[in-house]
Amino acid sequence: MKTLSEKEIIKIIEKNLPKIIEKHPEVRRKIEEILEKKAATKDDIKAILFELRKQREELIKQREELMKQREETNKRFEEINKRFEEINKRFENLEKDINKRFEEINKRFEEINRRFEEINKRFEEINKRFENLERNTNRRFEEINKRFEKLEFHMFEGFKRMERTISAIGTRWGYGAEEAFRSGFEDVLSEIGYKVIKWRKMDEKGEFFLSRREGEIDIVIKNKEKIAIEVKSSLSMSEVEDFERCVRFYEKEEGEKITKKIIVAIYPRKGTVEYARKFKIKVIKGLEEGEEYFRSL
């Protein structure tokens, strides 16, 4: 049990004695008898008054400190409220800014959709032109080649602006467009001094392919260096494997080693570039990049 100090006892008496005397008058008489037996001297009274005064001063001081702490707490709460108001304003402004940006993004997407619609219309027109070209006679081949060159230029520019959507566009063009790319790139290689040889041979035993079929590959020759090359509008992993089989078939049949293996692809599908590296095949993205590469050799 905790032992009370003298100050604590005095505080308890000061606080509870009046109530006790009021309820129990006999306690008052008992106190009077005690005081008669042990009457306090002036010095004792002075000491008691001094102690009471001191306690009062301490209480006043504690009250002032509590009031001061309360004021500081109120001040801090006011500051916190101000900060919350500022944060709320910032969130409101941020929300307005985000909504405004989303509106701008939506407008941009609408514009992009509109442009894609225009592009689709243009490609529908191009497909119609291809159909007309197929019906033309040998007498107009020279004119058709010129129109192909112009068309290729527009296609190359379109690929630069729409790399992310080239897969869907490439599907619409189909095999005819890919042949046009290959033909155009062969012309570029010829212009910069490379000789392009188309090599074809039948794998009679199905040794390199799953069954008997013809292997086909383009060989680029310059300064006695032989480079196997393939030009694709889009490139998949299976096409990488087919290219590697054709290279191995050529090396066995001709008894010659290919110096470099290059695939120029407008749109390599995800993972194909890394997959091609396993076979030491370099994949170049874009026809212009391919031209720059061969010019640098």
Image (cartoon, grey):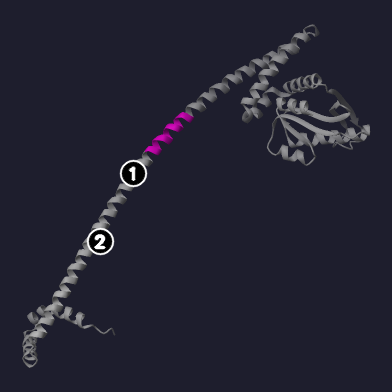
Location of residue 156 with respect to 84 vertically, above or below: above
Q: Say what amino acid the circle numbered 1 marks.
A: Glu
Residue found farthest to the top? 139
In the image: residue 198, left or right of residue 61: right
Q: Position of residue 250 (x, y in %)?
A: 89, 32
Location of residue 249 with respect to 198 vertically, above or below: below
Q: Main secondary structure of the magenta part?
A: helix
Q: Residue at x 68, y 22 (%)?
A: 156
Q: Position of residue 8 (x, y in %)?
A: 21, 80
The quadrant of the rendering that contains the C terminus is top right
Location of residue 110 with respect to 149 vertically, above or below: below
Question: To which residue does mark 1 refer?
Answer: 86
**Residue 265 in which image quadrant:** top right
- Which is nearer the eye, 182 or 2? 2
Q: Residue at x 81, y 33 (%)?
A: 261
Q: Residue at x 12, y 81 (%)?
A: 48
Is 101 covered by the magenta stretch?
A: yes
Number of the front mark, 2 or 1: 2
Q: Are marks 2 and 1 in contact (CB under 8 Å)?
A: no
Is 48 covered by the magenta stretch?
A: no
Q: Position of residue 52 (x, y in %)?
A: 14, 77
Can you tell which mark lies on residue 69? 2
Callout 1 crowding tier (Cα within 10 Å): few <14, some 14–19, many ≥20? few
Mark 2 vs 1, N-terminal side: 2
Residue at disc 1, secondary structure: helix
| Magenta stretch in the rendered image | 93-105
The quadrant of the rendering that contains the N terminus is bottom left
Location of residue 192 with respect to 267 vertically, above or below: above
